[in-house]
Image (cartoon, helix red, strand yellow):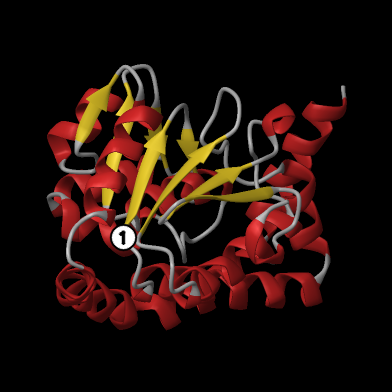
Amino acid sequence: MTLYDMPDEIQVAADGPLRIITLNRPDALNAVNDDLHTGLAKLWPRLSEDYDARAAVITGAGRAFSAGGDFSYLKNLADDPVLRAKTIAHGRDLVLGMARCRVPLVAAVNGPAVGLGCSLVALSDIVYIAADAYLADPHAQIGLVAADGGPLTWPLHTSMLWAKEYALTGSKIPAERAREMGLANHVTADPLADALGAAKKIAGMPRQAIESTKRLLNMQLEKNVLTTLDYATTSEELTFGSDDFRAIVTKLTEGKTR
């Protein structure tokens, strides 16, 4: 039984003071649908409220961390303004929830982390990535503004020139390049094992010192995110209704059903 009353698409397990969060749509490469997105928006306050949680690891089931937005979900967002408004609000909650979460979060990037998957990595505290994995934020490629994506946080992790290149082109960032750029800490053969090791070490350290140090660091992150978040969410909501996005998502969904 998963903790925090999460949907099936998110498994949360306890291992002593650790919480292991698994994105759980392996047959779809953990692509984001409405249930997964809604669950992620609600997850971080619940993790913060879990007094026994001292550190957490997030990973993906199967071959991917997350392949980004499910094409059918994207089409529904283009067609349904109510779902779109809910998703935009949840995206804001997700970003701020992660920035404000008191529990240190270690990402175990076991495969491709695309779109929202890439955002989850960018908002984590420590990142272990498999050598054959990669990051990518293709929002602009499909006609969207990345309101909860890499452009919110990448300028804090890497140079503005690198952030612009990968945000504007949506190109893949191979694991070693991500490490060199400051978007990952370690390239490793077993990211989950190494992430669990790091999380266990953190969980065994003095609680108040760890949580206050994380908060001190993330105050800088939150300040920068709040500077741009309202503009980003408004812009993304507008692009969900754009002709460019509708044409691209129609092409993607038609290609999937052939």
Relative to 42, 243 lies left or right = right
Residue 74 in percent (x, y) is at 72, 52
The C terminus sits in image quarter: top right
Residue at 21% from the left image edge and 28% from the top image edge: 177
Q: How many labels does the image show?
A: 1
**Residue 52 placement (x, y as % from top left):** 43, 67
Q: Is residue 35 left or right of residue 113?
A: right
Q: What element carries label 1?
A: loop
Residue drawn where x is 44% and y is 28% of the image: 110
Residue 163: give x, y in percent of width and height. Answer: 24, 49
Q: Where is residue 201 in the image (x, y as percent from the top left)?
A: 22, 46
Q: Which amino acid does label 1 sit on?
A: Pro
Where is mark 1, residue-wise?
Answer: 104
Which picture quadrant has residue 23? top right
Q: Can residue 216 be seen in this view?
A: yes
Question: Closest to the observer: 101 or 132?
Answer: 101
Residue shown at 17%/66% (left/top)?
206
Residue reaching furthest to the right: 258
Quadrant of residue 236 within the rendered picture: bottom right
Foreground pick, 246 / 182: 182
Q: Which of 180 and 97 is in front in this view?
A: 97
Residue 172 appearing in the image: no
**Residue under the point 35% across and 65% down:** 103
Residue furthest to the front in view is 16
